[in-house]
Amino acid sequence: MNRLPPRVPVGYRTVRPLSERPGSWTYLATNPAGDWCCLKLQKTIHPEALDELVAVRTRLAPLTRADGLMPLRAWGSDPGDGLLWEEMPLADNLVAEGPFASSQAETFTPVSLVTWLTENGPASAAQVIRWGIRLAGALTQLHAAGLFHRDGKPANILF
């Protein structure tokens, strides 16, 4: 495990971790309005690194409304803690299908391409083509803004 995660932004409540990488923590959480969300925290000890993260989010935030990109609902930084935080919707339509009960929080797993394939087996050629077109469109939006994902893999393709 990494060192202890940074302090959570005011008004957010973490329910449980979804993933952890060096300097980065992602949680199933509730936002200040009480809505379920994904809360990602990134911590750095170098002020220039935090400045770079903030600059990228400033360019990225408007793009996340494009089809195929995960919406960035809110974000901010705390230079005193070297923290960048991001709020995103849950990576599937679970909430859209009905209320997300607290009891579901224990078993919730974001639906990624990896989990979809594990649960459903190989996709049809037509489905792969539809996903490929949508993914290519999302990456085109990023690249047109001079941004690159740098970690494109099935675990990071979310539904």
Image (cartoon, rainbow, N blue to C red):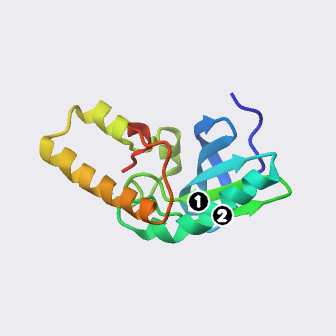
Give the alpha-carbon distance from disc 1 to disc 2, as whole Å.
17 Å
Q: Secondary structure at mark 1?
A: strand
Q: Is residue 151 left or right of residue 21?
A: left
Q: Position of residue 110 (x, y in %)?
A: 44, 44
Q: Secondary structure at mark 2?
A: helix
Front in this rendered view, residue 22 or 118: 22
Query: If you read the primary sequence from the N terminus, does the residue marked by circle 1 or circle 2 appear first?
Result: 2
Q: Name which quarter of the figure residue 60 lies in.
A: bottom right
Q: Vertical placement of 142 versus 125: above or below?
A: below
Q: Vertical placement of 145 versus 17: above or below?
A: below
Q: Name which quarter of the figure residue 133 lies in.
A: bottom left
Front in this rendered view, residue 38 or 127: 127
Q: Position of residue 47 (x, y in %)?
A: 81, 54
Q: Name which quarter of the figure residue 26 lies in.
A: top right
Q: Position of residue 3 (x, y in %)?
A: 76, 33
Q: Is residue 93 left or right of residue 37?
A: left
Q: Is residue 159 left or right of residue 50?
A: left
Front in this rendered view, residue 13 or 60: 60
1 vs 2, front mark: 2
Quadrant of the snapshot with the N terminus: top right
The amino acid type of the residue labelled 2 equals Ala
Q: Residues within 10 Å of mark 1 (few under 14, many from 20)?
A: many
Q: Residues within 10 Å of mark 2 (few under 14, many from 20)?
A: few
Q: Name the residue at 34% across, 40% down.
A: 113
Q: Which mark is residue 87?
A: 1
Cβ–Cβ below 8 Å for labels 1 and 2? no
Report the residue marked by disc 2: 55
